[in-house]
Amino acid sequence: MTKGQAPTPYSGSREDIVTGQESKQEPQQTPSTPRQVKFYQTGSFAVGGRLLDAPERTVQSGIKRTNSLTLGHRACQGCGEALGARYALDAAMRATENKIVAANATGCLEVFTTPYPETSWQIPWIHSVFGNAAAVGSGIAAALRAKGRDDIRVVAQAGDGGTVDIGIGCLSGMFERNDDVLFICYDNEAYMNTGVQRSGSTPPAARTATTEAIGRQPGNQWGQGKKMPLIAMAHEIPYVATATVAELHDLEYKIEKAMSFRGARYVHILVPCPLGWGSEPANTIKIARLAKETGIFPVFEAEYGEVTGVSKIRSKVPVEEYLLLQKRYAHLFRPSRQDEVINKIQEEADRNVRRFGLLGEDGMVQPSDTDKGISAHLGGKVG
Amino acid sequence: MLEQLEGSKAVARAVAMCRPEVICAYPISPQTHIVEALGAMVKDTTLEHCEFINVESEFGAMSVLIGASATGARSYTATSSQGLLFMTEAVYNAAGLGLPMVMTLANRAIGAPINIWNDYSDAMAVRDSGWIQLFAESNQAAVDLHIQAFHLSEEISLPVMVCMDGYVLTHAIEPLDVPDQELVDKYLPPFIPRQLLDPEDPVSIGAMVGPDAFTEVRYLAHAKQLKALQKIPEISTEFERLSGRKSGGLVRTYRAEEADTIVIGMGSVVGAIEDAVDDLRDSGISIGAISITTFRPFPLDALREAVGNPKRVVIVDRAFSVGMGSILATDVALALAHNDIRLYTVVAGLGGRAVTGISLKQCLSKAVKDDLEKLTFLDLDVDVVERELTRMEQSKRSGPSAENILRDLGTTTPETEGQL
Amino acid sequence: MFQVRIHGRGGQGVVTSSELLSVAAFLDGYWAQAFPSFGSERMGAPVTAYCRIDSHEIRTHEPISIPDALIIQDATLVHQMDIFSGVSQNALVVINTPHSLDDPSIAAYIDGLEKVFNVPASEIARKHLGKPIPNLVLLGGLVALTGIITLKSLHEAILKRFTGDTGENNYAAAEELFDYVQNTFELPPPLSMPRRAEAIHA
């Protein structure tokens, strides 16, 4: 553990250091930072900031981190979903004084966390079927309401398939009834549990097992798919947010913000999948950050149907940098470069930038952001 | 105290007496009156400490109940027909997880062709799901069975389905006695869940189970159902002790001792069977009836004992397995496998066709002379079927069969359409 | 057992009529069973409902194919469907019509029936309720013709369902038809049937 080059002096306790998560992440490099920043240092946008002052540290960097999803699970190396789920649920636990009940859809998260007779869940957890996590969550919330237990809160979670496809009926019902449930979608943009088949969240041109990189239009179709955060917003529920596993402060802030509301809430977390995306396990965080920095994945939050904040792009990156790290897009570069397709993806990203106002005045990084800790990640107001 | 009540309203009141904490349903005929009445009781606070949730589908309804039951809430829903099929995945899941809850199934046929009237194709479609299935032969039985169902469900930690004939019972208005709150409170112990989603003591429910333990977990479900075979008579006896009324149990006999012919049925058709038995007995025929109240678990031993040793058994079934025959008869045949009894099956009352006393008596009169086909479809219009079969022989493009048959019957001739 | 079949149209309160007849019979100490036939529930479509009255528990739930009494709420139905199916020559038939039974719109259909009573139920309903809803009015006529149900029970049954003026006006209309039937026709001999032990109005 190195703290030598931290811009802010270390002021945490000894326990904070020794109980922290052992990460095998490679040193990260953000395009806007001229020097390499080591993992546990402040100044990184990725990590827990345990060298920050106590109020600015993440839940993950703290001794009281609950490890809701604890060690021993069977996720792949570099699994973005495992990371996202632990971040999110630990943050939810902190926000509720450790009174969370979780409902889980069928999918990777369910399978890799509960290899019978073991479980990695340290919170009360139920898995029913694929398409009903939101409704099971509604049922838990109803039971708690009937029993007058408003201190216990409910999280329902699913992958993109269990959210945007097979689960959308129950989810929409939970939204419109404004049931007191936080629904978290871990979006890895395909059915990874069954072997990487296309979902309604798979981006255009991406190769999956059912949209192979063959034929005249290799990869997933253009002009299809749906944007679940916008669908959630159309229900005018109290809170909708997107996040990635690359920005821990932002993710935790949004979960805690979500828990400050009663009623239906939705957080959509982009979680890269090394298996399905054909990426290096060590690149999970990097790819998640590039998704945001290219504009491909807009990071924003909305209350009652209106966007209230966006996370600005710090240094705009061409989509190519994002695409090149993933074999699901390899056909765009080999055997020959498909400029037309790459440009189309760039246009989509640019459209997101315009639509959500993802660039600041100059589109450059605001150096003071990191020092402000959590509050900095509110992002700029839209409009 | 007897009151002149609609079956649905009486059942709703009985359910409310059981103090459910979560009620969740999606509307489908003929289940609606039950759920509407419960919704009103929650709204006007007759039923307190209860959440009534209007959901987007039956799949959602059953899923809400799964979450609610796992959180320790006494939970209830009602559905019919297509609704049951739409929730089937969650129906199996609730049973597999061993979650107590009660569901009224207002029995209705399954399409296509779409049909809103009564038969048991819906109940039969989920008979292997692991739910306990009780059949009400009257509205009074339906009222009593719902109260017993909560007791049973929570006692053995399995979901219980109370089947009552759609329209025939749900919409019939009859003198009924809904037990008072004091009786139900005395009868029904508080719900102590076997498994609970509790932050104080976290458990994982619904983990994946591989080949190493799946057989054992499934056998356990079977063992629980077998245990229910013991519990159901006990629970029924306890109910009788408090209410003074015999209801529930596994099977019930009617003038069956030493009878040469036994007629077996389930649900409201039992009333018509018993009327027929009385008439035939009056004309000197040795005949009796058995009503099967508990269909799952199937009471093989109790049925064998109740049947005794007649010359023949006639099974009246309101559903059938296409390509096979009566479903109920298959189970009855297993119960009587070692006995030398002639079995006749009568498939009757499909899609709401009335099982009339006249047809039933004609059919049974043939049976007692061993002059009945092994498998009979009561009041089947063979001619109409033959005409459609001929059409299908004659033309590759004979058109949709149901519509052809309706045209043959004159139900949708252009003339009447014009008048309507 | 006494079996009543009621024919009318969706919106005319056919189902309510059979229900309240069963409630009145119940209050008078009989076992009674009411149920509708379902199908098209749209306004104006033909609707049939049934009521059985007996001195012991009624086990059967099949539709009534051989009624002892037939109530026809809308006389135009006689042209449209076989509402006289299973009606024997002795059955009581109450037709809501302002016309005489010799009227060609009815006469051909009731040939051979001995106890047909034409009553102006819609007119009486209009007078008391301001609208021609004849369903409960006709029950007053049936009560007059059978003698097994009391006006007191009919009154209570109506008030259980319709509170205030609506209930009282409906009952007043039913009572007027009761009187009309008693004063206009030669009544058949009253029916008699043993009652339940715990009868409320026995």
Image (cartoon, coloured by chain):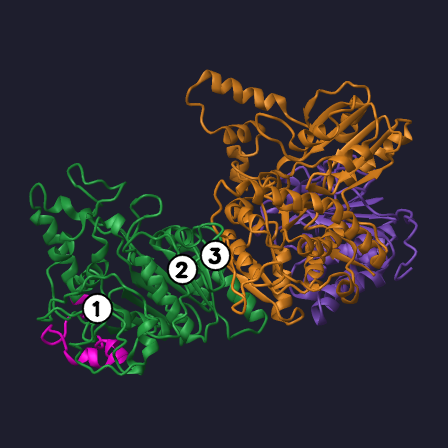
Chain colours: A green, B orange, C purple
Q: Are marks 3 and 1 in contact (CB under 8 Å)?
A: no
Badge 2 density bin: few <14, some 14–19, many ≥20, Cα 10 Å: many
Kindly identify the residue that appears in the image at 54 percent across and 66 percent down: B201
Range drawn in magenta? A354-382
Give me the chain letter of mark 2.
A
Give me the chain letter of mark 1.
A
Amino acid residing under circle 1: Phe
Relative to C67, A76 lies left or right: left
Residue A201 is one of the magenta-drawn residues:
no
Residue identified by numbered label 1? A39
In the rendering, at what x and y percent does residue A90 appear? 39, 69
Residue identified by numbered label 3? B56
Q: Nearer the viewer, mark 2 or mark 3?
A: 2
Quarter assignment of residue C107: top right
Badge 3 density bin: few <14, some 14–19, many ≥20, Cα 10 Å: many
In the rendering, at what x and y percent does residue C93 appear? 78, 44
Q: Is residue C88 visible?
A: no
State the separation of the CA atoms marked 3 and 1: 47 Å
Q: SS class of the residue under badge 3? A: loop
Amino acid residing under circle 3: Glu
Nearer the N terminus, badge 2 or badge 1? 1
Up the image or down, B107 lies above or below A3; here it is above
- In depth, the one of C96 and A162 nearer the eye is A162
Kindly identify the residue that appears in the image at 76 percent across and 24 percent down: B338
Residue A367 is one of the magenta-drawn residues:
yes
Q: Is residue A228 visible?
A: yes
- In depth, the one of A48 and A383 nearer the eye is A48
Residue identified by numbered label 2? A157
In the rendering, at what x and y percent does residue A274 appear? 25, 51
Relative to B356, B286 lies left or right: right
Q: SS class of the residue under badge 1? A: loop
